[in-house]
């Protein structure tokens, strides 16, 4: 079967099921072999080396579609199946545009639209993708392994919560402006033994700095969408520049973590289980199989306040 995938999470899952797509999006970078495949999408937004505020300004300034799909190239690949998504309007090509493009191709490829909004939805998509590409057995095996890993985290988290309670946890997937991570992240915080109240039940949403301070997070996880770990570390400066940074409990107790958001948290593939394990290590390091310092996609960040650059409250 000739499969085109227009989102990184589906690309990752296809490779895990033993299926190499014939075409991918420009954002597909895992596993490394995905980078060698024909690219069918592009964007007018320049992410490379840009700070969070600059990227946000570019996104707000775009007139029309943020992402473009090369329909001629798609037709030339003669796909049997095109996989797209409807979860996030700013993360990939609009699902409606993909369906229109597929319908315009003489071969008439089928489309599979993924729309996960919870942790369970994301894992269930492994089964959906497996069925669509006739890899049901491989998908069932992968899904069972993922369930076993989730169960291990759940049991450790129950023991950790019984011993020390649920730390107030804030997960941000953007820093300027601050955005609290939604969709599956709330489920993950609860599974990992944290207090999930800060995370929205729906999509990610902007949050006022004063609301972050008022929540008084004991653990702050910064995982900007599309940023690797080092860029996430630098992005913490956006938060540290706000008034009252030093009063946040997570800052005082040294539990601010910068996470590779490009690989973890923001892509609803089977690797969300990696993210769950990493989150548990941040929330309950004494009970985790690995501490945050041994996970190469996590860095503990110590950011002192530099008074001249401090922003006023409420920004």
Image (spheres, helix red, strand yellow):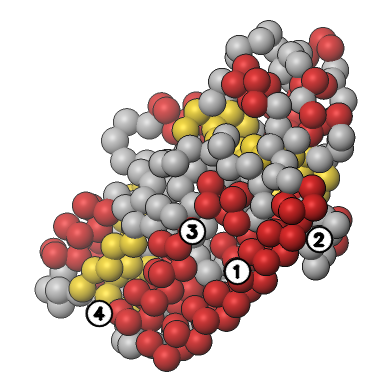
Number of numbered tags placed on the structure image:
4
In primary-sequence order, the first of circles 2 and 3 is: 3
Name the residue at 61% across, 71% down. 151
Q: Is residue 143 visible?
A: yes
Q: CA distance from mark 1 to mark 2?
A: 15 Å
Q: Nearer the viewer, mark 2 or mark 3?
A: 2
Name the residue at 41% across, 62% down. 121
Residue 33, image x, y percentages: 57, 76
Residue 246, image x, y percentages: 82, 21
Q: Are marks 3 and 4 in contact (CB under 8 Å)?
A: no
Q: CA distance from mark 2 to mark 4?
A: 46 Å
Q: Nearer the viewer, mark 2 or mark 4?
A: 2
In primary-sequence order, the first of circles 1 and 4 is: 4
In primary-sequence order, the first of circles 1 and 3 is: 3
Q: Specify the label residue 150 is tagged with.
A: 1
Examine the rendered structure and indicate whether residue 283 appears above or below residue 249. Answer: below
Secondary structure beneath dot 3 equals: helix
Q: CA distance from mark 1 to mark 4?
A: 33 Å
In primary-sequence order, the first of circles 1 and 2 is: 1
Q: Specify the label residue 287 is tagged with.
A: 2
Name the residue at 62% across, 32% down. 175
Q: Are marks 2 and 3 in contact (CB under 8 Å)?
A: no
Residue 251, image x, y percentages: 82, 31
């Amino acid at each position: 079967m000739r499969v085109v995938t227009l989102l990184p999470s589906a690309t990752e899952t296809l490779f895990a099921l033993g299926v190499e797509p014939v075409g991918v999006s420009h954002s597909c970078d895992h596993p490394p072999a995905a980078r060698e495949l024909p690219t069918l999408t592009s964007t007018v937004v320049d992410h490379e080396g840009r700070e969070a505020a600059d990227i946000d300004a570019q996104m707000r300034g775009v007139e029309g579609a943020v992402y473009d799909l090369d329909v001629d190239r798609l037709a030339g690949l003669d796909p049997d199946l095109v996989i797209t998504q409807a979860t996030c309007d700013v993360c990939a090509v609009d699902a409606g545009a993909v369906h229109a493009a597929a319908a315009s191709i003489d071969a008439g490829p089928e489309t599979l639209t993924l729309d996960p909004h919870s942790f369970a939805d994301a894992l269930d998509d492994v089964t959906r993708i497996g069925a669509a590409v006739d890899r049901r057995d491989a998908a069932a095996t992968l899904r069972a392994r993922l369930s076993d890993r989730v169960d291990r985290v759940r049991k450790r988290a129950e023991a950790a919560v019984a011993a020390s309670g649920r730390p107030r946890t804030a997960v941000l997937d953007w820093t300027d402006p601050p955005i609290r991570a939604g969709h599956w992240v709330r489920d993950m915080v609860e599974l990992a033994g944290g207090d999930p109240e800060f995370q929205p039940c729906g999509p990610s949403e902007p949050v006022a700095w004063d609301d972050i301070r008022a929540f008084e997070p004991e653990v702050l996880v910064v995982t900007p969408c599309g940023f690797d770990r080092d860029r996430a570390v630098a992005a913490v400066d956006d938060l540290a520049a706000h008034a009252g940074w030093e009063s946040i409990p997570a800052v005082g107790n040294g539990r601010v973590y910068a996470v590779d958001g490009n690989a973890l948290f923001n892509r609803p593939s089977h690797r969300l289980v990696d993210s769950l394990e990493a989150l548990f290590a941040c929330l309950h390091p004494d009970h985790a199989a690995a501490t945050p310092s041994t996970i190469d996609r996590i860095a503990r960040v110590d950011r002192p306040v530099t008074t001249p650059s401090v922003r006023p409250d409420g920004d």
